[in-house]
Amino acid sequence: MKKLINNAEDVIDEQLKGLASAHSELDVHFDPKFVCVAEGVKDRVAVVSGGGAGHEPLHAGYVGMGMLDAACPGQVFTSPTPDQMVEACKAVNGGKGILQIVKNYTGDVMNFQMAADLLRDEGIEVRNIVIDDDVALKDSLYTAGRRGLGTTVIAEKVCGAAALEGYDLDQLAALCRKVNTFGKSMGMALTSCMTPQNGTPSFELPEDEMEIGIGIHGEPGTERSKIKSADEVTEILTTRILEDEAYVRSLSEWDPESESWVDVEVTDIRFESGDEVIAMVNGMGGTPLSELYTVYGKLAEVAERHGIKIVRNLVGNYITSLEMAGMSITLVKVDEEILRLFDAPVKTPALRWGI
Amino acid sequence: MKKLINNAEDVIDEQLKGLASAHSELDVHFDPKFVCVAEGVKDRVAVVSGGGAGHEPLHAGYVGMGMLDAACPGQVFTSPTPDQMVEACKAVNGGKGILQIVKNYTGDVMNFQMAADLLRDEGIEVRNIVIDDDVALKDSLYTAGRRGLGTTVIAEKVCGAAALEGYDLDQLAALCRKVNTFGKSMGMALTSCMTPQNGTPSFELPEDEMEIGIGIHGEPGTERSKIKSADEVTEILTTRILEDEAYVRSLSEWDPESESWVDVEVTDIRFESGDEVIAMVNGMGGTPLSELYTVYGKLAEVAERHGIKIVRNLVGNYITSLEMAGMSITLVKVDEEILRLFDAPVKTPALRWGI
């Protein structure tokens, strides 16, 4: 197995040990059970996320000032457990409630709901907002409905900044929901990836083929084809995102009035000429930066042709799939509020600016 | 060929088009012939580097405020030409001379010397300082003497800051030489890489083997073995670096007094207990961040055991080999001057802090 690891069982512990050692300048506590801001949270909403490992820097790399207050790492491609989430949320509970940002994978959604119920039993108010921004397909090996992709990174950044500004829990939940409905993503892969536990490729992809619409766990995409050029691939993904119709679905959210989980109808935007966006070209882990910039060059051209103005961009590895070669594109429409919060200072291992 | 590219001949142009498009907020002019600070340089020394492409973000990603004033990208794994270097240096000539930072590969060394001679003919003073920090081996497919590795990144950062502080050309050359003698690196690979021109792996590495001491063009290293654990690999590389004896060699430098190229004897440090260092764990392009942090965790432990204090660190992809899976470790001893200059503000596509 071509990996720089020691034992498959220890990969999470060991990465976090390295993160802790490399980022002792940050006020962050790194622990395999949960990573959190060491000083805790006082008198404001705390923002918490988490999910299976293998997508680094997501989520542990985004804990710090102005982004996540805590993150729970699961094993590779495996949801963390409700008790981890409960402990993490209690460690950063500042008395004003918890926003849980949840990627739409069945295990994550279920476990974060269980955690929320347990926390409420202890008198802590919680809202769970699901990110389901992948336009490639509905339903997959890991998901009912659309999968959560790159919009998660933007939601964590924007909501972290809003929590610092003093948004209350209802406002934060509404903001997170807005970012989700404003964001769309799609990915592709040139190679498979391999979990340390299995030691064999998650799927087979012949030497001359690529897969479009792939998920971050190597779940099948929409189309397999001979390898296309960077321009063609970028055109396919960007066009699918920009021409994706408003997506209407029900997402389960806690209703404080009826004190029960209710199905909330959520509707995405459809991008329109004149929209301003944050654009992310995200590497899957094994793709060189030079290729991501080649993709970005074409993305900027396609966006401009559609009248879409890219006002901020991120090019690099932000939500990965171990050593998979490939990339995903995320576009998040911004309004004044989202842009202000995106630009606010942030200080985490993987995202840092303005400070 | 599993790459996100269009035509093999256009890869440099297209990456730079993407860089330019993504970093329009920077005052940098991106051109396939040379990348440079758009406003030019006034009344101070300019710092210039360059080399074959395929090592991104090196060097084009380091052009900007507080680091390189210009960089010349060659084709993949191929030195840029003297005329590119001459044009780049003239574009950023601020009347106080040019420091050329040159990785020790035969083509680069020769072409930067030719460029320096041509520039002097036009009345521009130039010093070439060679970086040869790879402790793995002397002489390789591409090099006489030791190869240039990660210390190049630190030298570019430190010298860029010193140029802004107003160091004159002699002082800057001495500083760059000092950083080179204070820095040592060593790399390893789990997989080969493939240039777009060839479309076949640069070398073969069986499924259960790794190569220690590899160069950034896939030049052979010192030892091929069954894959070892991250801890074992890190221990081998770090120990080789820390126990490397003071290395004495002759490097060709321009002597302004005799107006000729002379062989200057240069001697590296040997690390000693009590030394403070900048530590870099550098991904070769295809290795996930999570694995680099695993390596960093062990590196910190080995350094501590040797009495070496890591005062700054960089963990990520800084000097890569296309999509190669693997990593290199660089340790640069710091004194008050190097640390102050390393910490100074920098604003480039790939390195940005303090601003």
Image (cartoon, coloured by chain):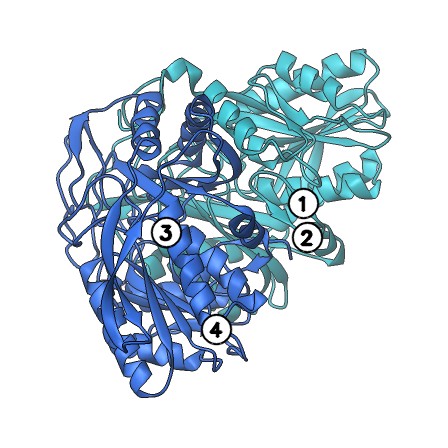
Chain colours: A blue, B cyan
Residue under the image location 43 percent in, 77 percent down: A97
Residue B355 image point, x, y percent? 69, 49
Residue A36 image point, x, y percent? 44, 72
Is A106 drawn above or below residue A270 in the view shown? Answer: below
Amino acid on which the number 2 mark rests in the picture: Gly
Q: Quadrant of residue B199?
A: top left
- Closest to the camera, between mark 1 and mark 3, is 3
Task: Classify mark 4: helix, strand or loop.
Answer: loop
Q: Which chain is disc 2 placed on?
A: B
Task: Classify mark 3: helix, strand or loop.
Answer: helix
Q: Which chain is disc 4 placed on?
A: A
Q: Is residue A328 visible?
A: yes
Task: Classify mark 1: helix, strand or loop.
Answer: strand
Of the image marks 2 and 1, the number of the one nearer the N terminus: 1
Label 2 with label 1: CB-CB less than 8 Å = yes
Marks 3 and 4 on same chain = yes
Is A158 drawn above or below residue B197 in the view shown? Answer: below
Q: Which chain is disc 1 placed on?
A: B
* Distance of label 4 from label 2 (alpha carbons): 29 Å
Q: Is residue A6 left or right of residue A123?
A: left
* Distance of label 1 from label 3 (alpha carbons): 34 Å
Amino acid on which the number 4 mark rests in the picture: Val
* Distance of label 3 from label 4 (alpha carbons): 19 Å
Q: Is residue B154 left or right of residue A329?
A: right
Amino acid on which the number 1 mark rests in the picture: Val
What residue would you read off at disc 2? B354
What residue would you read off at disc 3? A180
Q: Which chain is disc 3 placed on?
A: A
Of the image marks 3 and 4, the number of the one nearer the N terminus: 4
What residue would you read off at disc 1? B346
